[in-house]
Amino acid sequence: MSAVFALVIFPGGVFILLAGMLYEWVDRKLVARFQNRVGPRWFQPLADTVKLLAKEEVVPDGVNAQLFVVLPVIALAGALTAVLYVPVFGLAPSFSFSGDLIVTIYMLSLLTLCMGLAGANTLNRFSLLGATRTLTQLFSYEAPFLLALLGPAIVAGSWRISTIADYAAGHWLILTQPIGFAVALIGLMGKLELPPFDAPEAETEIVAGALTEYSGRGLALFHLGKGVELVVGLTLVAAFYLGGVTNPLWFAVKTLALLVGLAGVQTLLTRLRIDQTVGLWWRYGALLVLVQFLALILWEGVIA
Amino acid sequence: MNNPLEHTWQSVMDQLKTWARINSPWAIHFNSGSCNGCDIEILATLTPRYDMERFGVKLQGSPRHADILICTGPVTRQARERLIRIYEQMPEPKFVVAVGSCALTGGAFQGCYNVMGGIDQVIPVDAYIPGCPPRPEAIIDGLVKLLGSLKADGAPERASEPPLAASVLEPSS
Ligand code: SF4
């Protein structure tokens, strides 16, 4: 019974969806304020979602209709599953087993993978271009992002998120692993396709990227999945690097502080070309985080 | 629908739908032959100074994502099929706003050999915004009026029902 509750109401289902919309609004509002605009009203993401859910869903010619309908559902389900292993709202994770860090990270990638497949499933050339870019970007940020989250796991000596979070609650790992923190945060931006990493959905060049052919329900589910992923990603980074999220207040303060940083970077920088994105990650991101990883392993294995 | 509970539920859902539609109009912009004066004004409307995101308006690139088709200019014979195609690609419910004198009647281009006339000769139009070109304030006013008319009965009154029939869809020789 409590498992069902955790899945459907809190923290898994309804609450995390609402929290995702709230965080999306905060992000949009902050960007608007940085650009000297008024910005959207507080219920904007909710209105967008309801409207999209109530709209007609067009299934275009030439797609595999079953895949077309089922992909958004899998994407959202992946994001919602990841929530269960993460200390959202400053509470202990609903479920945990040793190694759940890896599972969570791959659950989060499921959304991107589904978007890539969704784009490749249509005949639309813009979707195809978007899908290619989405998957290229996935391969560029995924490894550095994973390595950046493994840094805290190494020092905590565990692959279980709750153990790492407990360890990190006593240590501000941002001070000892600043590179990992930066790479994790920027990797999160890549994951969510926020500017400057929005080449996969660049609306000025390729219409709307992989989701060009999606309308109504499918689009709404992908948007919801993104919101959930934003909350989960921010929680992970805050829990691992910013001294843990041990109660709801700290959760709100730390994740929102991270969100202000994200919105600032989004406003400051312009879109990178896809080759620049890949170059940035593999030339600098991956190398830097690998060096730090090596230093950590040496420290843990030889000195400590 | 005889069950009163079911009836209430239905009306609540309808209200929620209308509320969401009014508060989240995503737009797509199509130029079917305008002189670009109107397009510049539409872009000006979307700049931070006027900030349409206040009303939830978001410019979308894909017709599949959009609710409102903002059209400018008279319909040229070449643009007609594209216009119809974009209109058909949008999912229901969809609304069309004609911006500028040319989009209303053909304006300065009326009577040209390659011009069909206003937008409403080709697809049904829900709101007309006159001016050559209309100011951003006028465009915002037109959009707000369109959304206001949604509130009244869920569907705006159409000023005209053009013959969006096979005869129109087929390319003219
Ligand atoms: S209404 Fe005026 S500005 Fe707009 S397209 Fe026509 S001539 Fe150009």
Image: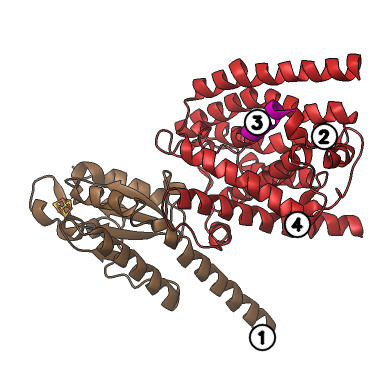
Q: Secondary structure at mark 1?
A: helix
Q: Residue at x 86, y 57 (%)?
A: A4
Residue under circle 2?
A: A101
* Camera-nearest label, 3 or 1: 3
Residue B164 image offset from top left, x and y in percent:
31, 57
The Cα–Cα distance between marks 4 and 1, rounded to whole angstroms, is 44 Å
Residue type for callout 1: Pro
Residue A43 image offset from top left, x and y in percent:
56, 63
Q: Residues within 10 Å of mark 2 (few under 14, many from 20)?
A: many
Q: Residue at x 69, y 43 (%)?
A: A234
Q: Secondary structure at mark 3?
A: helix
The Cα–Cα distance between marks 3 and 1, rounded to whole angstroms, is 57 Å
Q: Are marks 4 and 3 in contact (CB under 8 Å)?
A: no
Q: Main secondary structure of the magenta part?
A: helix
Residue under circle 4?
A: A249
Q: Colour of chain B?
A: brown
Residue type for callout 3: Ala
Q: Residue at x 41, y 59 (%)?
A: B94
Chain ID of residue with mark 2: A
* Camera-nearest label, 4 or 2: 4
Residue B4 image label: 1
Q: Secondary structure at mark 2?
A: helix
Task: Note the chain letter of the red one.
Answer: A
Residue A186 image label: none
Chain ID of residue with mark 3: A
Residue type for callout 2: Leu
Q: Are marks 2 and 3 in contact (CB under 8 Å)?
A: no
